[in-house]
Amino acid sequence: MRNRALKPGMVTSMRGKKKKELPAYIRERISLDELLASRRVLQLVYEKGPLTQGEASEALDLSQGACNLHFQRLEYEGLLRAHRIVPEGRGPGRPSNHWEIAREQNAALGLVFDPPNVYVQLEDFTAAILFSQGVSLRACRRSEKIAEKVSALVVKAVDEARARKLILRHAFAALPGVLEPATGAVKRAVNFPALEGLDVSDLMQRAFKMPTLANSLGAAYYYGEAATIPANSTALVMYWDLGLGFAFGRNRQLLTVHGGEEGGRMISELGHISIDAQGPRCHCGERGCIEAYAGGWVLLQQFAGKGVTTLEHLVRLAESGDAAFQQALRDISKLLGRHLAGAIQMLGVSEVRITGPLAPLFHHGRADFFTGLAEIIGIHRSSAIQVQVTEDFKGQLLAGATRAARRVYFYPDEFSQLSRLSTTLQGQRMAGS
């Protein structure tokens, strides 16, 4: 494979012209090694733009001179652009520059490991999809082979970015299982062991010099749904796959719990909360986890006698009207309603999104889910909760990964203390280990 490494902070000229050198008086006053000094200005324009330097100066309590330095530096970096606006009529108003993010010139990369497949998606900052492709990992038995397939996909995305003269700012890798807190390398992936040992952040840095945050698959699922969640609403996103995961968020920001030395953690592992100490054995090694009743791997085992071998077969079995499977789905839905009720009430959840390859199964137990909720928190509270099933889960998931990549670029602090270790699988013995 040819070396397609990107230089850190690479800026590609939009018109193929040689990039001008930043004036010395700006280089001497603002560090060019990082964007920290100009981060607040960048975030303000991202949130409120287009706006003038005067409006930014007032909003951030900065002098006009300081604002001018930041705007020039961010324009030089290819992040901002100005539109000259001339007042209409013969009034005394003077022309002014209104600044906005150069969305068509910048891009982010999302990598989604959704076993047995991996997907890579390139989007510019307008969220336009410029490249999207996946490959099966079924034949991979070791993480090194997976790394080769990922690199080949990323090369194609980088080539597309170069052809369009885009600036690739950041990547986000969404991974299942338990991740090392410091690096994001896969520590345990009970449903796809070949991922264990894979360090996507290191791979992307070595091969492409691209800053990459590796985190939970749940983060991508949440950000995939966030665009359709009403402002000021707290949402629960349940992703139903071989396993059963959850993500909570408010105002397009993940909710975390804090404690211990790992910092904030996603509230993602409710699927591994035990509801019966004598219940069935879960893949995590414990008994009676919610996932041990409702996970896709459980359903595959229970209905293997009906010729079911894939998640797609489960969806088709439900659509066929099979009586035994319909009853199983009603029982599972009621169980989910009962055991999610406490978290829903405690966090003030008003929006629930069901996503993942098994999301269509929820239609067959929707009424039972609300029955389970009502048994714990009452009919009045449960009826106020809006539940939607995501039809295009893969499209939303990939969009969520690129959206997370953009967000971590603009708001790195939001992710800097977000641990990759789950709250319940940390230190637990895996089944069969």
Image (cartoon, rainbow, N blue to C red):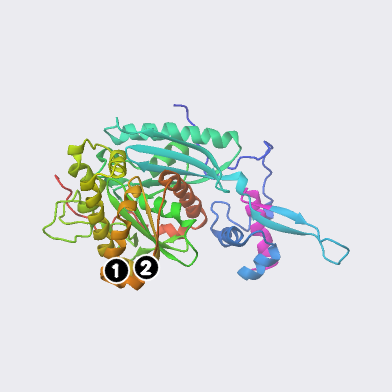
Q: CA distance from mark 1 to mark 2?
A: 8 Å
Outermost residue to the right: 90
Residue type at mark 1: give it: Ala
Q: Secondary structure at mark 1?
A: helix
Question: Is residue 346 something one can see in this rendering?
Answer: no
In this orientation, which residue lies closer to the viewer: 329 or 171? Answer: 329
How many marks overall?
A: 2
Instruction: Pinpoint residue 251: horizontal percent, then vertical percent.
Output: 47, 63
In the rendered structure, which disc, 1 or 2, sits on the residue that comes first in sequence?
A: 1
Within 10 angstroms of label 2, few (less than 14), some, or many (20 or more) residues? some
- Provide the residue designation for mark 1: 374
Q: Nearer the viewer, residue 271 or 168?
A: 271
Q: Is residue 61 above or below residue 11?
A: below
Residue range in magenta is 62-81
Q: Residue at x 67, y 55 (%)?
A: 72
Determine the residue positioned at 42% across, 47% down: 391
Residue 297: % across, % down:
23, 44
